[in-house]
Amino acid sequence: MSKRKLYILVFIHLLFWALNYLYITNGNLTWMGFDNNSGSLGIAYGYGMFFNAFLCYIQVFWLVPAFFIKHKKLTFWLYSLLLLFVITFFETYLDIQTLLHFEIINVHVSKLLIGASVFIQNLIFHVFYSIFGFFYHFLFAYRNAERAKQELLKETHQTELKYLKAQLNPHFLFNGINSVYHLIGNNNKLAKDTLLQFSDLLRYQLYESNEAFINLDKELEYVSQYIRLEAIRKGDDISLTYDINFESSSLKIAPLLLTPFVENAFKHNSHYDESEKNSIEIKIQEEEQKLTLYVNNSTDIVSQQQPFGGVGLANVKRRLDLLYPNKHTLTQTEENGFYKVHLIIDIS
């Protein structure tokens, strides 16, 4: 627990006891003859509240952690009962002396009978606060355990996300180099232009996308640049249409989530002799803080010799689960020679 949270917790407890005391000592309450008019109730409730707090916190900080949770139940009960009765006897003695001091009882009255009555009432309060302290310790321990569990889970997720994101760069680098390689010798000028644009994309991955979340307009510009790069590389071999629109550029999104789906469409596109049959359709739209990605690409037997997805899509699916749990839907279908991806993310 941080110091700030500890200070807040201590303040809340002190405030509870202070309000408790003020409530009792500023009304017309009476208890066993003690009253606020004479000031006797303020004195009696003052040391009585101190004993109640003592029994409560000694359960929280010593008896329960030192004995009960370490399976020393007999020692726990012995110490608890001993403290309970010793403190009750001592408070009862103070109560009798206070009653005598304020002449609420006569010195000739049987102190034994009054003491027995006061003892029983004090014992009831002390048992209540002891039980409260007992259960408060477990409530406090449970909250700390849950907090530690959440922090560990968050740390695990962050580590996994860093690992998954680190995989993207080599995967993207491999595909980019492979694309340029096939152009060298066939079209060296295009290979140079492609390599230049590819270096810009890689720069974005290495330097600009290091934040956990990035402006939506930057991410969509990166996707647009990637599509334009692939369009240059593919040339007239494909029929490509794409449309990217957004309402708010100030929205944030986790970087490099959309590209693997677009990359997959180009990688597994069909290889028909008629270029118009090798189609890729990409639509990205942000509306009312919901981002929709639709990718539809033609496939054929040749492209199906390798499984769809692989490292890139498996990676991004896991990142979606970690970054947008219960805030995204992803459907992937393959039918009638087309592979379709429909992704909706709530980026509010």
Image (spheres, rainbow, N blue to C red):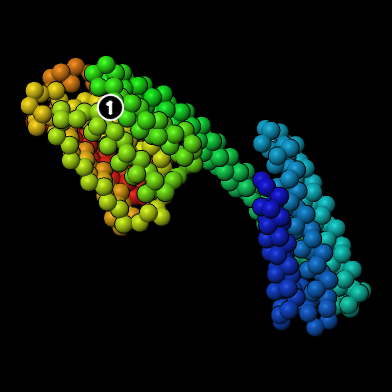
Q: In this rendering, is residue 321 above or below 135? A: above
In this rendered view, identify the residue nearer to me: 226 or 124. Answer: 226
Does residue 215 appear left or right of residue 67 in this picture? left
Residue at (69, 64) in percent of width and height:
16
> Based on the displayed image, in which of its 4 quarters is residue 224 positioned?
top left
Give neighbour class at mark 1: few <14, some 14-19, many 20+ (Cα, 10 Å). some
Does residue 157 appear left or right of residue 81 in this picture? left
Q: In this rendering, is residue 341 above or below 126? A: above
Q: In this rendering, is residue 201 above or below 307? A: below
Does residue 106 appear left or right of residue 52 in this picture? right
Residue 183 drawn at (x, y percent): 27, 21
Residue 220 drawn at (x, y percent): 34, 44
In this rendered view, identify the residue nearer to me: 197 or 271. Answer: 197
Residue 81 drawn at (x, y percent): 75, 46
Does residue 279 appear left or right of residue 331 in this picture? left
At label 1, the amino acid type is: Leu
Q: In this rendering, is residue 283 above or below 23? A: above
Kindly tell me whether residue 225 is visible in this rendering. Answer: yes
Residue at (38, 48) in percent of width and height:
216
> Based on the displayed image, in which of its 4 quarters is residue 10 positioned?
bottom right
The secondary element bearing badge 1 is classed as helix
Residue at (53, 41) in percent of width and height:
150
Residue 80 drawn at (x, y percent): 75, 45
Count of labels shown?
Answer: 1
In this rendered view, identify the residue nearer to me: 175 or 129. Answer: 175
Residue at (83, 71) in percent of width and height:
43
The residue tagged 1 is 190
